[in-house]
Every structure is written in structure tokens, then in C-alpha cells.
Amino acid sequence: MEHTTPIRLKSITEFHKLWELPKPEHPLISVVDYKLIDHALVASNQSLIMDYYSITIKRDLGVKIIYGQESFDFDEGLMFFMAPNQVFRIEKEERNKMDHNGWILLIHPDFLWGNPLARTIKKYEFFNYTMHEALFLSEKEELLIMNLIDAMQHEYHSNIDKFSQGIILSQIETLLNYADRFYQRQFITRKIANHRILEQMEELLESYFRNDAMANGLPSVTFVADRLNISPSYLTGLLKTLTGKSTQQHIQNKIIEKAKEKLSCTARSVSEIAYDLGFEHSQSFNKFFKSKTKLSPLEFRVSFN
């Protein structure tokens, strides 16, 4: 499908105009009722870019969000987060439902100016292009989030005074911290599936160092995540929750494991082993091995034998 030039929505007011909504009550923050959004107003091949953050909670949208070149199914999970300058488009499905409901919280970066949240908001990985899993919520968690949204909406609907911005910013930060907690819980509560991903990664790395390393070099985090059909940030978050180690650390541990195996069980030279493992130069392998084991490959071989 041929895509047109993306529409850039520079302000929250422009978002309201595009979806034919009433003018926002505050230029830098808005809560939009999803029942008021008609997806037919924007063509399926039309990409959009927003210059502000969006936090969405939704049900039964009957659409897919194409986001970071990946398809994000809005029927799975409840919450979805997007940062400024990210390109997306909405793909309507034949079963498109008109009874969709939920809300979108729009936050312009200028609203955060002068507050530590302007900097710390970037630490929340769920705003990243590489996070493709929606956040699932229990009824209790959803009620907690909705109460925070209602409180923000009430605050900016009221007469704005010198306390309003600070109160709303604290509410936004509380919402983000709860979302961070719930994402971590999501990793843990899917324990069986997550342990299966660990098994699949182990099988993948075993196969890679058996067959592909010499031709393709060292495996990257992106390579591993792509083969497991999940995003790099999600994989690293999952591994840290389950094992305390990042994806990169798991890859490095596998390299050391295979290197020790070859050094102790074969007569191959250090240069040959380095090549077998995907290193272009034996010097790089020597430096890497020593940084992880405090011994050079030859010192390890001698000490082992």
C-alpha cells in the first residue's frame, strides 16, 4: 500500500480539529473520550506524527496501530503509550466496532517544562518504539488509573491557579510509576510463557554458535529479539525480571561458555576459536575473554589442563 506524507499534529488543538472534537479546555493537556473518535476521518494509508505524549486506555477498537513498522493490535491489552515524533497509522478492520470506548491523555512537552518530569519521563521504556506489548490491567488497577485520569481532568476543568500545573504533574508521574509497576508485574505473571522464551533463546544461541557465528559474526540483541518475535526492550526487561541480567549479558555469557568449551575440549588454536565464535580478530576475542574471566584464553587453557 502506498503511504502519503505523514500529517504532523503540532498541537493538541490540531488533534481535536482532525478528529472533529470540541476545542480543548487547556492547550497543553487534554483527556479525550474515545467514543467521540471516528476512525473513518483518517484514511488507513495516512500516517500521523504527534508532537506530544499520548497515554491511551481502550476497549474494542477494532483497529490496528502500525507503529515503528510493527503492527500493534489494540484488542490485546488495555493501555498503550506513545512519545512525541513517533510515526503511526491506524488500520481499520472489517469488523470495525462503533462501540469502542476509553480515553486518550495527551500531554504536550511544554506542559512538563521546568519540572523534573521533563527529563525523567524519558526513562519509561513503554514510550519507546521498541515496546510492542500493550499493558494488561486488572479491574482494580484499571480503577486506580481511571481515578488518576479523572482527578487530572477535574483539575484542568477547574479554575487554573498557581497550584494546578504542579498537582497535575504529580498525578501524571504517579500514573507513570504505576504503569511501570504493572508492566513489571506483567512480566512476572506470565511466568510460564516467559520461561519458554528463555528456553527458546537458549536454543537459538546454541544453534547460532553451532552454525552461523563464523559467517555472520557475533549475535546482536536485535537479532535475538527478532528471532523470538518480541522487541529488544521487552526481551531485556523480561530477562532482567527473571534472571537479573540483560539480553547482552546473556549473549556474552553464552560466548564465554562456548569459548571455555572449545578451549578445554578441543585442540583448536585461539585464532580458530575466535573465528568459530564470530570474532573478526583474535585480539578482540582475547580482550573480551580476559575482561570476563580475568584470564587470557591461553591462560585458561593451561589452568584447565
Image: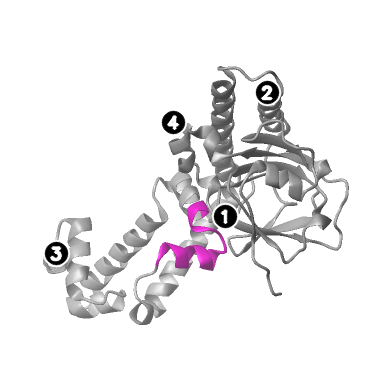
User: Dot 4, crowdedness within 10 Å: few (<14), some or many (≥20)?
Assistant: few
Q: Nearer the viewer, mark 3 or mark 4?
A: 4
User: Where does label 4 land, which residue?
Assistant: 116
Ranked by sequence position, the earlier of labels 1 and 3 is: 1
Main SS, magenta region, reads: helix
**On screen, residue 167 above or below 241:** above
Camera-side residue: 212 or 263? 212
**Which label's residue is closer to the chain start, 4 or 1?**
1
> SS at mark 4?
loop
**Upstream in the sequence, badge 3 or badge 2?**
2
Q: Which residues are magenta?
A: 220-234
Q: Which tag, 2 or 1, sits closer to the chain's start?
A: 1
The amino acid beneath tag 4 is: Pro
Residue beneath label 3, please?
A: 296
Q: Position of residue 249 (x, y in %)?
A: 35, 55
Q: Is residue 274 above or below residue 57?
A: below
Query: The N terminus is located in which quarter?
Result: bottom right
Picture coordinates of residue 305, whole percent (x, y): 14, 67
For the point 70% across and 27% down, the residue is 153
Q: Is residue 266 left or right of residue 106?
A: left
Provide residue 98's location: percent of width, then percent of height.
Answer: 88, 50
Amino acid bearing label 3: Ser
Q: Secondary structure at mark 1?
A: loop
